[in-house]
Image (cartoon, rainbow, N blue to C red):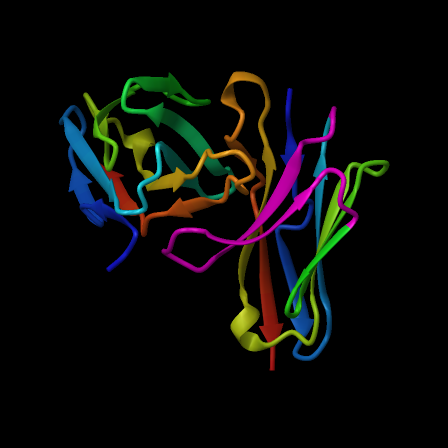
Amino acid sequence: SQKIEQNSEALNIQEGKTATLTCNYTNYSPAYLQWYRQDPGRGPVFLLLIRENEKEKRKERLKVTFDTTLKQSLFHITASQPADSATYLCARSSTGGSQGNLIFGKGTKLSVKP
Amino acid sequence: DADVTQTPRNRITKTGKRIMLECSQTKGHDRMYWYRQDPGLGLRLIYYSFDVKDINKGEISDGYSVSRQAQAKFSLSLESAIPNQTALYFCATSDPRPGSSYEQYFGPGTRLTVT
């Protein structure tokens, strides 16, 4: 089965540091991985997508990596700010007839302290 | 105006009642989804629709039904609500065209409580 795991339920860091969140998947590599941000009581918001043939993707202070050997994606927020505090969801693409569907991890709650 | 809207935003209902959650989108996307989110369980797919005539069960469809009234509208029904259907429900859309990112756009959610 296609599974995706975010091992840390919560991560606490100091403002200005780099936050690193981990996402692991099982079995075969997905065509792509996506990362979303979710604030309390609100819907997830798309941040970044990285495809299987890409090693790294950047967007402003965000960086995502995709390691097919380790079956892992890392999500980095550099120079973190209290406003970055939220839950971050990793999602893998599904395959076959449901291509385009996503399977979500449970999320990691990031808290950035001033 | 929001691209994906959900009504109601909050609902408290009693066990055994029928309830409908509605979703509308202005993004022009063919694909629409219904998820539920529970603490510790993450987002789980209930139903998805690739177009008006193509509706499919997701991971946890038992106890739910859906209707795709138009490209822009996708409703979720609980025929006979039970307390373990208490959750946060999200509607989402995506663009299936080749080369797209399959990014999903989520609505604001409906908080449903079944007593």
Q: Residue A56, how many percent across, how many down?
A: 76, 53
Q: A80 left or right of B67?
A: right
Residue B10 visible? The answer is yes
Residue B81 location, quadrant: top left
Residue appearing at x 41%, y 47% in the figure: B105
**For the image shown, how many numbered marks are present on the structure?**
0
Q: Quadrant of the C terminus of chain A?
A: bottom right
Q: Is residue A32 magenta?
A: yes
Q: Residue A63, how many percent across, how many down?
A: 70, 60
Q: B10 left or right of A74?
A: left
Of all residues, the one furthest to the right in this rendering is A69
Q: B18 left or right of A78?
A: left
Q: Residue B26, how many percent across, how many down?
A: 26, 47
Residue appearing at x 52%, y 41% in the figure: B100
Residue A64 location, quadrant: bottom right
Q: Quadrant of the N terminus of chain A?
A: top right
Most foreground residue, A100 or A38:
A100
- Please report the bounds of the magenta region as a residue range: A27-55
Residue B115 visible? The answer is no
Q: Is residue B1 magenta?
A: no
**Looking at the image, residue B109 lies above or below residue A103:** below
Residue appearing at x 13%, y 27% in the figure: B17
Of all residues, the one furthest to the front in this rendering is B98
